[in-house]
Amino acid sequence: MEAKELIESGKTALGIELGSTRIKAVLTDFDGNVLAVGFHDWENSLVDGIWTYSLDEIHTGCRSCYTSLRKAVEEKYGVVPKTYGAMGISAMMHGYMAFDGEGTLLAPFQTWRNSNTEQAADRLTELFNFNIPLRWTIAHLYQCMLDGEEHVKNVDFVTTLDSYIHRVLTGEKVTGIGDAAGIFPIDSKALDYDGEMIAKFDRLVAEAGYSWKVEDVLPKVMVAGEEAGRLTAEGAAFLDESGNLEPGIPFCPPEGDAGTGMVATNSVAPRTGNVSAGTSTFAMIVLEEKLKKLYREIDMVTTPTGFPVAMSHANNGTSDLNAWVNLFGEFAELIGHKVDMGELFGTLYTNTLNGDADCGGLLAYGYLSGEGITHINEGRPLFARTPNAKFNLANFMRAHLYTSLGAVKLGIDILLKEEDVKVDKLYGHGGFFKTKGVGQRYLAAAAGAPVTVMETAGEGGPWGMALLAAYLVDGKKYGRLEDFLEKRVFAGKEGDTIAPTEEEIRGFEAFTERYSAGLPVERAAVDSMKW
């Protein structure tokens, strides 16, 4: 069929992902070919020490994004979309959204960026003998319990952003297993929350005097390929302000951005891995077996089908880097040379290839928020250099590109060097890789291994979410999710692969040594810069 016919007949898949700086919708056919995209840009706010988005911003953003997609379809194909073969919602993982029995939000939404849960995360890690990162939903819930917050006694539903929007659209309190793995530890054999750990947490709940049980307030766990509800009339009216969207569309389980990143890079089978680099940066490797020991720097999550995944997750990625690029754009405009921002990013990124492999001795930390991997609980963006460092534009920008991978590399080193984890394929995706051959080359140097970027990598998580929706309605005939991706979506698509040189590897290792040695400077900045 032609694209117009596919859209009119509903033989399409729609994925919507609420990212940190952009809500994006991607419409595909069942082969994964992109038909149209929609956008809504937004930013989190720091309110009373909490990184958050208001419910109004969330609702408005979802509608605006869908309207953008609908208009794009109308302009490109001359048809108004009324239905889809399947839909799916994804969003930034982790965080805390707590509701009472009436569906009222009990406390401000806390995003993954918040690191105010150290006490809870430490206690739960010891109790479970399993790493509980500061940003995980259960750490937020337990911290609220420890702090004696009044709203906790009224909790009826505790969830993440994608699961919340899924409930708004379908009425179902569920989430995908990959997203659930950032809520509470998962038993990959049972494909559910870990039963022993649930029992241990319920004892904490009972000791605190609350009447609810944790398994009753968390979303139900589902896996890729299962139907997770259908669009209700209320959900259709919520999403499509034009009133054209019809109810009844099946939904796949909602997922976190880690899971959709795995799907978008064909990294859901053991010995595959990917690095998503944008506002936050995380590396994920699908394991053949469990790690030998617990690491506070490594999260254990899952693929959308439940395979165990080791994740090195850095809260901070390219935000401070973007701020510097914007500063150069402001300067250009000031001297009468207004430039296209895409061109500016590309020019500055490409010029870094003229810099030194170790960035000439420069050092930067793009810590807008706390960083769990380096155990720093607040952020202070920082640039530093010694008097004899090679301070030029190429090295300056290269240092900020390197530091966007700095924290996540520490986790990668644990997996590859200490645990001897095997990786056959490593993929990169996200805005960091948009300028061809730059970010990809630096990730290859950081990992000491070839990195592949697919042509589809720029569509990222929402495209991965659309693929999960397509798998629900037209992909299970191929068998497992990894078979659908390998045989149908990625068949014949090799991507562009870059292998690092020895000089590049040595250069990034030198920068990493400097990065590790300079962490006391970053901690001192947190301690002293209190204004």
Image (cartoon, rainbow, N blue to C red):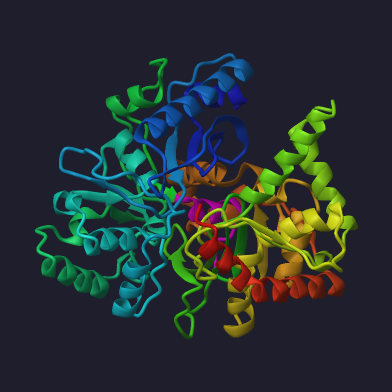
Furthest toward the right, the residue is: 354
Tell me: 491 left or right of 507: left
Q: Dividing the image into 4 quarters, which one contains the N terminus?
A: top right
Q: Nearer the viewer, residue 24 or 452?
A: 24
Tell me: 277 left or right of 112: right
- Residue at 49% across / 79% down in the picture? 289
Q: Nearer the viewer, residue 294 or 260?
A: 294
* Residue 419 vertical placement versus 231 (above, below): below
State which region is magenta: 256-269
Q: Position of residue 99 (x, y in %)?
A: 23, 44
Q: Quadrant of residue 514?
A: bottom right
Q: Nearer the viewer, residue 48 or 200?
A: 48
Residue 191 visible in this rendered orientation of the protein: yes
Q: Nearer the viewer, residue 255 or 225?
A: 255
Tell me: 291 left or right of 516: left
Residue 380 is a magenta residue = no
Q: Position of residue 412 (x, y in %)?
A: 61, 72
- Residue at 42% across / 58% down in the picture? 178
Number of numbered discs visible in the structure rendering: 0
* Residue 301 vertical placement versus 79 (above, below): below
- Residue at 19% across / 72% down in the picture? 199
Q: Position of residue 85 (x, y in %)?
A: 44, 33
Q: Position of residue 513 (x, y in %)?
A: 71, 76
Tell me: 390 left or right of 207: right
Residue 186 visible in this rendered orientation of the protein: no
